[in-house]
Image (cartoon, helix red, strand yellow):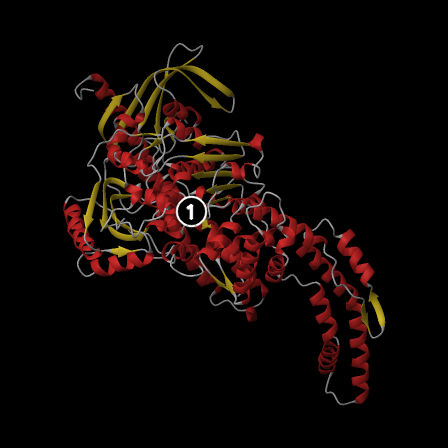
Amino acid sequence: MNKNDLEWKLENQWLEAVLKEAQKQFNEKVDFKEKFKKDAIETQRQLWQDLGSVSIANGMDQIVEFMEFIDVMKIQKRKHELSRKFQEKYERIVESPYFGRIDFLEKGEEKEEKFYIGISNLTDDNYDFLVYDWRAPVSSMFYDYEIGEAMFECPEGIVEGNLTLKRQYKISNGKIDYMFDSNLKIDDEILQDILSKNTDNKMKTIITTIQREQNKVIRNEQYKNLIVQGPAGSGKTSVALHRIAYLLYKHRDKITPQNIVIFSPNEIFNDYISNVLPELGEDNMNQTTFKEYMHNALGIGFKKENYCEMMEYILASKDEASYEERINNIKYKASMEFIDVLKKYVVYVENLERDFRDISLRGKLIISSDEINKLFFKDYSDLPLKRRLQKIRERILFLVEPYEKLWIEEVAHELKETGSYIDKNEINEKSKALVKAEMKDLYYSINRSTEFNLLDIYKKLFEKLEAFAKSSDSEYNEQKLYEIKRYTLENLRGKVLNYEDQSPLLYLKGALGDLPKTSSIKYVIIDEAQDYTPLQYEILNQLFSHADMTILGDLNQSINPFMNVGDYKNIAKIFPENNTCIINLSKSYRSTIEITRFSRKLLNQEITDGCVERSGEEPLLLGFSNDDAIKERLLSDIKIYKEKEYQSIGIITRTKKEAQEVFNFLKDKIDVKCIMKDDDEYVSGILVIPAYLAKGLEFDVALIYNVGNENYKSEEERLLLYTACTRALHVLNVYYSDKLTPLLDF
């Protein structure tokens, strides 16, 4: 579009009017914020002058007055925080108030209406919309339709008509850099421009480039549960975060960020995505990892292996004598068959006869074993085991209390008669201590019969494993089951809790009623869904059955060959079919077409997913005689790519040990960082990282360290290598020593 034509003049006039209004509102928010700040300072000054030092000795009136000041200060703080958020919103608007425009002629109307679309709503003093939030119902047409028939859904119903114009802009520093009318997909020009840029240390918003299939996920409220499958680089995580922003916008009167939780693959990724919602004008939701939640919930005094330690074992311990035994153990505990075993065992434990005995005190029967059994199997039968035992304990102690109190009174009377004690308080304390000592065995018996010992319950499952694992179509014969049983019990006796044992423990803990309620959570996002086992989905459903779930993943990026979902069919029965929808994202936007084609050859299968036609350098396969030669070439290449001004360079190794070796070689020669644990902070620049920690991340340049035949030599590592290669946006180099892995033999 020619910058000299009338349309440019009109657009600049409109932009000027929008910016003028935005600047006015921005100044008002700054003034409000300053006013709130001054009010807060004045309140604190008045508090000090009127009350001085607060002390109980000064009487209750002073305390009451002090609390009133505190309430005022809390209100002022909330107002100041709200004003700060508004100020940040208008700062974003002034920088770039909108990125799109659609002209829509509603059916039955004579004149089309203009809708400018940006990151936030902007209205004038007459409440007329100058800019519509990208999440507003009418804005959906910008993402879903080209010129021609279009519609959108609003609270009043479906509005039909025709799009007569669709225009896209790039505005920065309050100036239009370029604009064009488009009857093409958004990915043709603006998307190409954005994708060709270098990345930095945080994920960015994608509101200017949301595609129709992505918009379908972001705005979908037809189903309680969404399962989203998409190839590497299809924007799954971005879509999830924009979906959260959409829900917060649409249901602002019902939900807050505290009602939403996202399960990320690791803490590194949590840090990486932490800027997206604030950039969209929303506070961050609850962020956690399954490992973090599980470790906190179990909270037991065992040495708990974490996910990274298990991955290191899988990748680096193949020569150990017990390796196959451990792998069989991992596979079994991640299997659908083991879920059935656990469910049978829960029923067994809840109906198991318990060793309840008569409770008597000083020869007086307080409650019989028959009465306790009636409470357990009838009165409290609708409660899970842990809660039943708690209720029984509370009931017994309630019945014991008057007898104990009477005994204490009798002892106190006897002590008083001796005349050996100074006052009443001393007599009461002494009598209580004497009775407590006498009742120690009784309390021990009550505690023992109502004890809930999760680890003991888990041990007993494996002591009787064969009884619960009998199945005609099982691939696990008696010998295999015996080996799994022996291996597990040995570790538990040694107070070692392998990662694969933690999910079963957490499942039992939840099924038997020992997990806190999560009713405040209304929406759950599960990212990198392929790396969760069916049992972990059972647990998540157990915890959040009341919440809506969005589950996003890529089966081709299952980095753990032995603990993964396998197929989404494996979790289909957990979620009601009539309230669950599977949506496929079909296009990758991350890598150049050359990198995408190279990476997909690794999958050894026909791939129909599309990709953005963004060209770049062909990936390089570079062979060397040994590891030291690879490191020298890495150093040389890193310097070249830094000179080309690439912002992020990822050196992706297979294991933590390799990452440490590469980092040690580079650290005194260039400015390089490393990530070795899943709770390390994400940093940009030059970064050394094991492949299993790199999922979800992306780099301008990905340098894959040593894919020689001695490193990536088994079929189980194909998807790990694929995941590593798909981290690259612009440049992919693959280095190997001696012979190249057969996985790249194409």
The image quadrant where one finds the N terminus is: top left
- Residue 83, compared with residue 146, is above or below; it is below
Q: Residue 267, position in %: x, y?
A: 40, 52
Residue 433 percent location from the top left of the image: 71, 79
Q: Amino acid at mark 1?
A: Pro
Q: Which of 190/555 is in front?
A: 555
Query: Is residue 73 visible in the rendered structure shown here?
Result: no
Determine the residue positioned at 58% across, 30% down: 578
Foreground pick, 496 / 299: 496
Residue labelled with disc 1: 561
- Residue 284 in which image quadrant: top left
Quadrant in which the C terminus appears: top left
Find residue 158 and report its horizontal and vertical position in percent. 49, 19
> Does the rendering let one see residue 490?
yes
Left or right: 343 in relation to 400? left
Instruction: Establish if 735 lies above or below 100.
Output: below
Instruction: Indicate the position of residue 374 as horizontal and vertical percent values.
Output: 80, 55
Residue 574's place in the image compared with 382, above or below, is above
For label 1, the SS is loop
